[in-house]
Amino acid sequence: MGRLGRRSWTEPLEEDMKCDNLRTKRTYRFRIALSVGAGILFAALIVSSTAFAQRMVLKPSDSPVIDASKDDPYLPYGGVKLSGGEPPSPKTPPAGYQYINWPGFRYDRETKTTEVFLQLTGSVTYQTKFRRRSTTITMDNAKVYLRNNFRPVITRHFPGPVSRFRLRRLKSRRHKGKIRLEIRQRRRVQPQVALRTIGQYTYLVVAYPAKRR
């Protein structure tokens, strides 16, 4: 009876070990939950920053500093304009090709006209397709000088018919060396497409007339 009523000296040690194991499991689970939460938050930040970096949004501005040009009365960004000469010409394009230096956009408040234009190092041949709410222009033997110029340009904040546009490289073999300008429109309208030479640059200009009342 005496032996059966005694507690083993190892029992308190076993209970302490169980408590330590329980604490370790809880701490491990907490760390896993914390790591998963931090990973989700980091992924959300990456996705949001990537989405912002993949497009360029242009908005009108009433600032007299930004919007004071008589030639370009609605140009609230520091890009190129149809006066030629800026930015400086990039390096010489490969033989048989022309560089697209920069895509530009302009809305004229006085004439109510809209222009999407490309500044090039030289003349190119192109094909134009008009659809109900889009215009696509495919240029032959062209290259985009900077990868940043492939980003979509969002222009929906302007009152003209153009809601957004972007440059896209065609990757199939039969389209080798071709760059496409894709323009989305709010309504059905057919713009005028032409090449202009101003100074040392050539411009491919897509001009949309004012809306008829």
Image: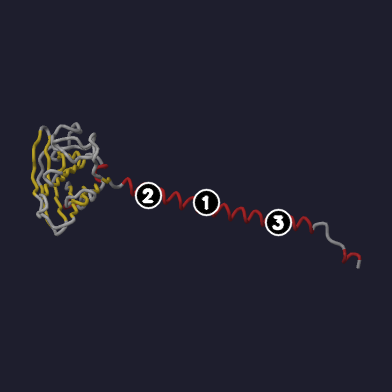
**Foreground of the two, 52 or 24:** 52
Check disc 1 and give the amino acid type. Ser
Please tell me the numbered disc located at residue 2.
none
Q: Are marks 1 and 2 in contact (CB under 8 Å)?
A: no
Q: Are marks 1 and 3 in contact (CB under 8 Å)?
A: no
Quarter of the image for residue 202 reads top left
First along the sequence among labels 3 and 2: 3
Left or right of 16? Residue 50 is left
* Quadrant in which the C terminus is drawn: bottom left
Check disc 3 and give the amino acid type. Cys
Spatial CA distance of label 1 from label 2 is: 20 Å
Name the residue that disc number 1 marks. 35
**Foreground of the two, 205 or 62:** 62
Q: How many C-alpha atoms fall within 10 Å of the one at disc 1: few (<14), some, or many (≥20)?
A: few
- Nearer the observer: mark 3 or 2; the answer is 2
Spatial CA distance of label 3 from label 2 is: 44 Å
Left or right of 199? Residue 143 is right
Name the residue that disc number 2 marks. 48
First along the sequence among labels 1 and 3: 3
Secondary element at image label 3: helix
**Residue 125 in picture, x, y percent from top left:** 9, 45
**Residue 203 in picture, x, y percent from top left:** 12, 40
Name the residue that disc number 3 marks. 19
First along the sequence among labels 1 and 2: 1
* Quadrant in which the N terminus is drawn: bottom right
**Residue 76 in picture, x, y percent from top left:** 23, 40
22 in relation to 70, above or below: below
The residue drawn where x is 24% and y is 47% is 153
**Foreground of the two, 84 or 17:** 84
Secondary element at image label 2: helix
Check disc 2 and give the amino acid type. Ser
